[in-house]
Image: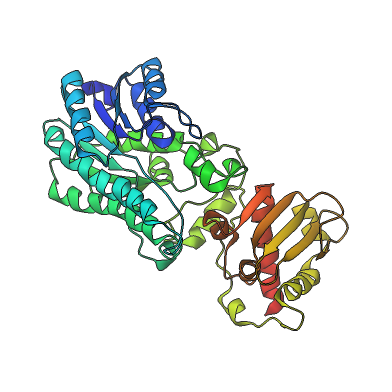
Amino acid sequence: RNYSNTGCTLFITGASRGIGKAIALKAARDGANIVIAAKTAEPHPKLPGTIYTAAQEVEAAGGKALPCVVDIRDEQQVEEAIQKAVNTFGGIDILVNNASAISLTGTLETPMKKVDLMLGINLRGTYLTSKLLIPHLLKSHNPHILNLSPPLNLNPVWFKNHTAYTMAKYGMSMCVLGMAEEFRGQIAVNALWPRTAIQTAAMDMLGGEGVGKQCRTADIIADAAYVILSQPKDYTGHFLVDEDILKERGVQDFDQYAVQPGHPLLPDFFLDEAPETLVQQMEQHGATPAFKPPPSSSSSSAVPQSSGPIESTFDIIRGVINEDLVKSTQGIYQFDLSGEHGGVWFLDLKSGSGSTGRGEPAAKADVVMTMDSSDFSKMFSGKLKPTMAFMTGKLKIKGDMTLAIKLEKLMGRMNKAKL
């Protein structure tokens, strides 16, 4: 079954851009009706698209669109949009809970206004929209609810840097857990999450320039959602990952989804059920994972503290760099460190057998990495992975992102050298 067989109507929250809009356009190509329930009516200074521009794209793709201004924290606005949708299209078959707010900040750094926003949109908004739509979904031949939320992975590593965000996203996943069971046999309720970072306005805000080429496009989520929403209603209670669904469907070419085919991909949050297999997968895709678990014994080995921790780190770096590393890296790094052991350092892995020292490099740096000196020490001792440091805002990167990922190789060598 594809969407068009029933003149299917989808109610999609946060559909004015990003993943929500990609799911809308994929359905529109089948002639589906799309309710675009999102906040942006007037063009936003920082974000692309409005509900009206998204509606034009849906119509151009072959679907029918109903743009509705909806803040899913507002019960009345949700209720009105649903009523308008039922009056326009005669019913609703599918709900996609996509709208989300994100702030990857720790407990002390997250203002309550941000906490309320995340819990209000992600958790309560998803619950509210589902609750109000279920009576209408129950009248459909093949109703589905699909939440864009992660598998419930209770490893503390996914909580400690952004407890509020994780609670809010897991709230959406708990809606799946509960409602799938509550409406088993009546409504299919599932969750979908990407294997890698997806290029959206949200990602640009989190990652800054240069993060794009480590992402896949939202098309991979749209294609995966299409497969899920085409299943019968007894296909329910599943926490699905985009790449896995498509692999099961026989898709082999994942380069079609890459922003820059062949470039290392940034793995998404919450999926560490087997970091080793993820590492293998990424290496098969020609990537250099920035999150290989460091050898456990490395953390206990003490670095001589005589000349300060940063100096000691660079002493170890000097001992492990060579022509091979220079050949495989081909980049000049500059580290702008703040905090207790602040200062500027460089690492030249572009010429000869490499060099390092205090101050700016002689030639212009290809990548400048800004961070606290204590985080720098943690990173090079294997306690803080560059990807995590970057995603949680501890590390700012300007320039070639690939070089940041290549640092991982050097760190692996250092940890071996210290043992």
Quadrant location of residue 80? top left
Quarter of the image where the N terminus is located: top left
Q: Nearer the viewer, residue 286 or 169?
A: 169
> Is residue 235 visible in the rendered structure shown here?
no
Quadrant location of residue 340? bottom right
Q: Is residue 140 above or below residue 373?
A: above
Q: Is residue 181 above or below residue 88?
A: below
Question: Residue 105: image x %, image y %?
Answer: 46, 58
Instruction: Tell me the residue at 71%/53% (across/down).
Output: 368
Q: Nearer the viewer, residue 38 or 302?
A: 38
Instruction: Tell me the residue at 39%/25% (across/down).
Output: 25
> Is residue 388 visible in the rendered structure shown here?
yes
Horizontal placement of 178 versus 30: left or right?
Answer: left
Horizontal placement of 330 versus 272: left or right?
Answer: right
Quadrant location of residue 85? top left
Question: Residue 186: image x %, image y %?
Answer: 13, 40
Horizontal placement of 138 versus 157: left or right?
Answer: left
Instruction: Tell me the residue at 33%/21% (across/down).
Output: 30
Question: Residue 203: image x %, image y %?
Answer: 50, 43
Q: How many marks?
A: 0
Q: Nearer the viewer, residue 296 or 15?
A: 15
Q: Is residue 189 above or below residue 391?
A: above
Quarter of the image where the C terminus is located: bottom right
Q: Nearer the viewer, residue 176 or 65?
A: 65
Instruction: Tell me the residue at 36%/56% (across/down).
Output: 112
Q: Is residue 57 above or below residue 294?
A: above
